[in-house]
Image (cartoon, rainbow, N blue to C red):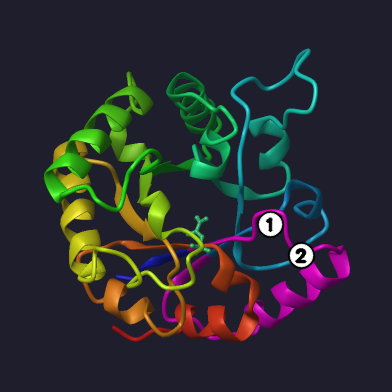
Amino acid sequence: MKKLIVANWKMNPKSFKEAEKLLLAVSKTKTTQHPVICPPFVYLPLLKTKLDLGAQDIFWQNSGPFTGQISPEMLKQFKVKYAIIGHSERRALGETDNEVNLKIKGAILNKITPILCVGYGLSAEMEDEEVMQHLQSQLEADLHEIDPKKVIVAYEPVWAISTGDPYKTKQMENPEHAERICMFVRIKFKVSKVLYGGSTNASNAESFLSRQIDGLLVGGASLNALEFNKMITTKI
Ligand code: PEP
C-alpha cells in the first residue's frame, strides 16, 4: 500500500511564481507513494495540479463573523481533501486542544480528512513511556467525541522538527522510536493512519517508510523539488 507523504510548505515560497514552479517540478514525477501538497491558503485556488491538495489549517464554522478565518466549505471549492490541524507551530501561538477538537469536527463534517499533529510539549529527554502518556492526554482531548477512523494522526516530536537531522538528538534510534510511538497511537486510538514528521528528507525517508509508519509529514525538504521527488518515489 502506498504511504502518504504530506508536504507542508508552511509560509513558503515567497511568490506564486515560485510555488507554481515547485509544484510543476513535483507533479511531473512518477510517484511510488501518495503525495499531498499543502501550500499557503492564498495559492490554493491558483494552483493547477492532479496531485491531492491539503490546507495547513482550517476553521470550524462555515461562515460568519470570524475575521481572518478560512472555512471548510471554502476550501472544498478548491478541491482540498486534507487539512493539517494542530501543528506545533500553531499550538506555540496559542491554539488549544479545544480549538483543535472543533477544527477536526468541522473538517470531518465537510468531508475533509484531518491530519492531526501531536507531540507539542514533548522533550527530547523523555522516555517512550512518558511520551506515550503525554500523547494519550493530547489525543484524548483532541479526539473527544470524534470517530478516530476518520482521522490521520501525525506524530511530530517538537525537538525533531526543523533540526535538519532527526538523528541529531538523544533518540539516536529515531526510526525505531518513531515506529514504537506510531504503533502505540494506531493501536490505542484506532485512527486511520499514523504519520511521522520531524526533519525527514530524501536520505532518511526509507528508514521511516520501511517500518510500520503510514507515511511522513515533511516540512523543509518539501520545498526542494529534487529532494521531495526522491521521497515520493521511495521504493519500499
Ligand atoms: C513540520 O513542521 O511539520 C516538519 C516536519 O518540518 P521539518 O520536516 O522541516 O522538520
Identified at 33% across, 43% down, the residue is 122
- Image: magenta residue range: 6-35
Q: Which residue is mark 2?
A: 13
Q: Is mark 1 within 8 Å of ligand 1?
A: no
Secondary structure of the residue carrying numbered label 2: loop
Residue 208 is marked as: none
Task: Point out the image quarter for the C terminus.
Answer: bottom left
42 shown above or below 14: above
Identified at 76% across, 14% down, the residue is 64
- Using the rendered view, name the quadrant where residue 226 is placed: bottom right
Residue 211's spot in the image, x, y percent? 21, 71
Identified at 61% across, 67% down, the residue is 51
Residue 23's spot in the image, x, y percent? 71, 72
Q: Amino acid at mark 1?
A: Pro
In the rendered structure, does residue 205 fall within the stretch colored magenta?
no
Secondary structure of the residue carrying numbered label 1: loop
Q: Amino acid at mark 2?
A: Pro
Q: Residues within 10 Å of mark 2 (few under 14, many from 20)?
A: some
133 shown above or below 168: above
- How many numbered marks have been drawn onto this rendered protein structure? 2
Q: Nearer the viewer, residue 112 or 177?
A: 177
Q: Which residue is mark 1?
A: 39
In the rendered structure, does residue 23 fall within the stretch colored magenta?
yes
